[in-house]
Amino acid sequence: MNGNVDDTYKALCVKECPTNAPSLTEGVSIESLEQIDCLLNSDYSSCPYKQYNTNQLLGFCLPEISSTIEQLSAVAEQMGQTDNLTTLIVSASKTWTLMIYMAIGVFFITLLYVFVLQWIAKPLLYISTVFLLFLLAGLGVFVWLKQGDYEAGTQEQQGMMGGAIALWVLAVLYLVFLCCNWRNIQMAAAITQASSDFLSSNTRIISLPIMTYILMIPVTGMWLFSTTHLMSIGTPVYVPNSYVGSMEYENYIIYLFLFMLFGFFWIIAFMGAY
């Protein structure tokens, strides 16, 4: 290093890579940590503290992957960190097992839904249609009763009264719409029933979206790879109290990113359609 205070990265030599560092999640303050045995240079007036475990790789001391997320979470809570990227990493590290269980659960729920769809498709359509009518009317009654919580003549009381009347008007219009289009609704119910029968007798069709998602993985990976390289073309900007900095880009970089984003959505939509 040349000792320039504007250098983005500063390094110093250590006797050995730090290990056996205490966890910051245990309530240990940074000031009470053990200092690293180092060789000072113009960038450092004192040796840093041993805050996390490291492994030696190609002459550098790199943080251990197993403890990095834990330390990021602890420091983020202590600093009141609101950085979106840090929050995403910490949240994913704490909930990845739950997300896997949810994905498995959604798959089996889909299988169950396809199996029972042939019996519940038509009743579900009629029930949801009538339920919406009662929901509008019930909300109108609820809002009308809530106006009693406010003094008569106040803006809040008049707003509640107007909201209740508006909901009842919507309910009446919806009822008229149902009466005028009841034959069309019956036809839609019959089409839904026929579709559910076909889907229930051809359960292998469920594999189509799964295969589509699998095919989207390499496309998404290629797009992320190219976009990462594109967005690295810029000027780094230091952001105080943040794990990550910011980048300033020229206009042509933004235009290229928008072009690539449009292309990505277009390809994904094309694959989803076919």
Image (cartoon, grey):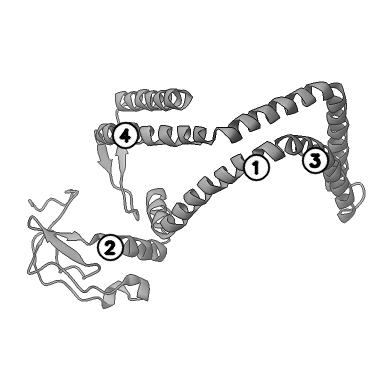
Amino acid type, mark 4:
Pro
Residue 153: x, y in percent? 91, 46
Using the rendered view, name the quadrant where residue 41 is placed. Answer: bottom left
Q: Which residue is mark 3?
A: 131
Amino acid type, mark 2:
Ser
Amino acid type, mark 1:
Val
Q: CA distance from mark 1 to mark 3?
A: 21 Å
User: Which of pointers 1 and 4 indicates the residue nearer the eye?
Assistant: 1
Residue 227: x, y in percent? 30, 33
Q: Which residue is mark 1?
A: 116
Amino acid type, mark 3:
Phe
Residue 155: x, y in percent? 84, 45
Q: Which residue is mark 2?
A: 66
Q: CA distance from mark 4 to mark 2?
A: 27 Å
| SS at circle 3 | helix
| SS at circle 1 | helix
Residue visible at 74% across and 28% down in the picture: 189
Q: Which residue is mark 4?
A: 218
Q: CA distance from mark 1 to mark 4?
A: 34 Å
The answer to which of marks 4 and 3 sits earlier in the sequence is 3
